[in-house]
Image: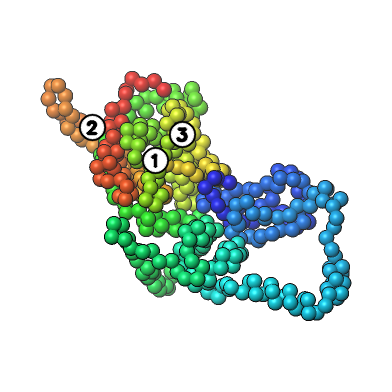
Amino acid sequence: MGESISEATVIRWLKNEGDRVEADEAVLEVATDKVDSEVPTPEAGVLSKLLCGEGDVVQVGSPVAIIETEAASSEPQPETVEQAAAKVEATPVETITKSVEEAAATAAPITNTGDRFYSPLVMNIARKEGISMAQLEAIPGSGKDGRVTKRDILAYVKNGVPATEPAVVPATPSAPTVQASTTETVKPSVSLNAGDEVIAMDRMRKLIADHMVKSKQVSPHVSSFVEADVTNLVNWRNAKKAEFQKREGEKLTFTPLFIEAVVKAIKDFPLINVEVDGDNIIKRKAINVGMAAALPSGNLIVPVIKNADTKNLVGLAREVNDLAGRARNNALKPDEIQGGTYTITNVGTFGNLMGTPIINQPQVAILATGAIVKKPAVIETKYGDMIGIRHFMYLSHSYDHRVVDGALGGMFVKRVAEYLENWDMDREV
């Protein structure tokens, strides 16, 4: 899986217990964030036991099935039920009772009596660390539906929180603390009327909804808008696209042209290419540009062009077309939607002039490109001003006001516009 993925959801098993499997044969499908992937078996043998069911959330690195290989048949076999029963009969009742009591005492410190779901792994860590159920309930979860993940509980333990009482953060005169509001958002009640249809969200839509809400909760969004005269860009593309497709076998869309301009602007303003980690700002060296792509289902996915600054226009066009095509066919790999440092979304595809996109966390900015439309405009020439027909488009830049101020956010989108407006009509591709 991708390096930033810590867990996956089992969608369905492709094989049943007792089935013969070959090495590298797909045995199950899993989902991570927005991509479904098949998981192959590393060895040939018989699928003797499934360790998780469909719908279960499994930590990356955890076993999901047991495969009995030919080498296993030569190893000592486990005890049969009859052999184990014979041993129990030969054991004094007092010893058995004592062992059961000790086991019960070990598991007693924590029992989940509430409605919140905790995985066995999280419960085991809580027992081992002596975390009470009340403390576990107070841990904010970063998993699906607010579920506490292994990362959440280990971070709780690492921060040195006492196992017997909630953490108390002392306030100091030199570093005043901000108390976060604990008020829960009250969801409005919805009543159904005659003829209404209830449509259940699919898995991807639930993930998108959760991602968008969390982004608004994490980042104070601010937007800046610039109108760009892209007449030279449009005329250049119209003159080159047929030749480009004939020579390269690829369509020359506007997307790689926009990406190239964004990459140049990021080099001019590298503090747009950052992420926030607590009180630290991480300035990324790699420029990995995500491009939002619409799926046939109506959902969105964001494949990432890694190291976009190292690719020429031909390379960008090839990768844009490849990722967009495989996104529509649900053929992206998990790593291909991870690691983005800046995102572009083309709302002009749907005829929109502009938009206010939501930041794709943990990035700090996102650019929406609007529809290109013809407008009458004043053209300044050495002979005086005149009216002409020009191609214009709006660029909408949303950014995280925690670390990107209006000056930086505004100058960045203006620089992108300048690169598009000053397109070289004599450029070869």
Instruction: Give the quarter of the figure containing the C terminus.
Output: top left
Query: In the picture provided, is 188 more to the left or to the right than 105?
Result: left
Cα–Cα gap, marks 3 and 1: 15 Å
Residue 189 location, quadrant: bottom left
Image position, residue 339 (x, y; %): 48, 43
Q: Between 318 and 4, which is closer to the camera in this rendering?
A: 4
> How far across and down, in percent of the image, does residue 352 sit?
33, 46
Disc 1 residue type? Answer: Lys
Numbered tag placed on residue 283 in the rendering = 1
Closest to the observer, 13 or 240: 13
- The answer to whether residue 337 is above or below residue 260 is below
Q: Amino acid at mark 2?
A: Ile
Mark 1: secondary structure: strand
Task: Measure how far apart labels 3 and 2 are at the Cα level.
Answer: 37 Å
Q: Is residue 408 left or right of residue 3?
A: left
Residue 166 found in image quarter: bottom left
Horizontal and vertical percent for residue 148? Answer: 51, 62
Q: Is residue 201 left or right of residue 359?
A: right
Q: Position of residue 245 (x, y in %)?
A: 47, 26
Q: Which residue is mark 3?
A: 307
- In three-dimensional space, the C-alpha distance between marks 2 and 1, rounded to whole angstroms, equals 42 Å
Residue at numbered disc 2: 389
Q: Which mark is residue 216?
A: none
Of tags 3 and 2, which is closer to the observer?
3
Residue 185's place in the image compared with 212, above or below, is: below
| Cβ atoms at labels 3 and 1 below 8 Å apart | no
Q: Residue at x 32, y 47 (%)?
A: 403
Q: Are marks 3 and 2 in contact (CB under 8 Å)?
A: no
**What residue type is disc 3 on?**
Asn
